[in-house]
Amino acid sequence: MPSPVATGQQLAHSQPSATIPSRLFLPLIALCTAVTAANIYLAAPLLPLIAHDFGSVPSAVAWIASVAQLGYAAGLLFFAPLGDRVNRRRLVAALSLVTAAALVVGAMAGGTGALAAAVLVASAATVVPQLLVPLIAERAPADRRARHVAAVIAGLFTGIVAARVLGGLAGQAFGWRAVFVGAAVLTAGLGLLTAAALPVEPRRSREGGLFAGLRAMPGLVRRSPDLWRASVRQAGMFGAWSALWTSLALLLTGERYGLSTATAGLFGLFGLAATVVAPLAGGLVDRFGAAKVVRNAYLLAAVSVPLFWLGGQVMPALFVAALTIHAALVASHVANQTLALTTTSAPATANSAYVVAGFAGGATASALAGLAFTHWGWGGVVAVAGVWLLLGWGTTAVRR
């Protein structure tokens, strides 16, 4: 039976399906990643519209954004480790169809409970990017691995930007339900096309059952200090970003600025920094190593926290803060994920552990940020972000 290492070596020399030319394979993966990743953040810029439709206030439905992240973390636990054990072509196709169906159900929801349930299922099935990233890392030349991973990460963050900007604009024009239906169509179409384009893989061992990867995950993290450190540091970084970014629409559409949902969604354009930072970070990781890149990313994130606090009163400070926090998050993610993918012989399981940690940190921080905004306003949100950065770096700095 083939080992994970042997399977990775075979995949590294395999070719994509004849469905598309080889030169288009990486761009297709990046595009599929963008569309599927957008589903996790689809509800965030639409919260004011959802609240109005259900006769509530935006802060009362902010928890739906946290449900999406928790659902994604659950999907990473149960589905993403299967990338080491089952045929990824079938898995990508099946998960894409489940996500699309859940989004359609969400579009027909009559209340926040039904919508949250649909968002939970859709987010749990939206783990396609984390099935594709290990494949790209396996296929990439060793000296350019971080740059190839960075290309997919750039697609991921472009999807997040699209969810905020295009989602907000489309929601303002056509309603939030139409946005959910449109996302369902794109997810199904690109998911099936990508599945058809993936390489034909050798038959994999299912010894221990389909969920052996899930059971092995805690031990894998314990045995790999590099994987543990990457996971905790990204949890801190992603938590800080999530606290600020999922609450930003509440600040911008609130009394202080009074912007429309569509205008507030334009702030997502600052996330396009990812398309510039990700390739740069990939080159720096390949040249200087992951640790140095993560350290400088944390310094940049620390600078953004007081800028976000000032942005509660001064709009230009929000512009600078949005750029710095995105640059910090993307650089940290490229470095930490490359480390997670290359530190064990079970890359899909290791990658799942890494991303679960990140999104668990993000979901928890988002939930606390919603409560903080309700009780203490924007200052409370900024405080949550600062605490998450301190936890992420301080915990890993103490343990060798």
Image: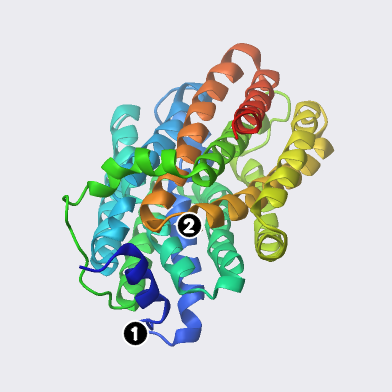
Does residue 306 appear in the picture of this structure? yes
Estimate the x, y position of residue 233 in percent, counting from the top left.
Answer: 59, 38
Residue 285 lies, with reference to residue 160, above or below; the image says: below
Q: Is residue 386 above or below residue 23?
A: above
Q: CA distance from mark 2 to mark 1?
A: 27 Å
Q: Earlier in the sequence, mark 2 or mark 1?
A: 1
Three-letter code for the amino acid on which mark 2 is drawn: Leu
Which residue is painted at 71% across and 40% down in the image?
298
Point 34% across, 33% down: residue:
116
Image coords of residue 364 (percent x, y): 48, 27
Left or right, 140 with respect to 286, comes to left
Mark 1, residue position: 19
Q: Quadrant of the N terminus?
A: bottom left
The residue at which mark 2 appears reads as: 341
Q: Is 295 on the left-hand or right-hand side of 338? A: right
**Residue sitting nearer the eye, 267 or 137:** 137
Quick one: 50 or 77, which is closer to the camera? Answer: 77
Horizontal arrangement in the rendering, residue 12 relative to residue 393 (left or right): left
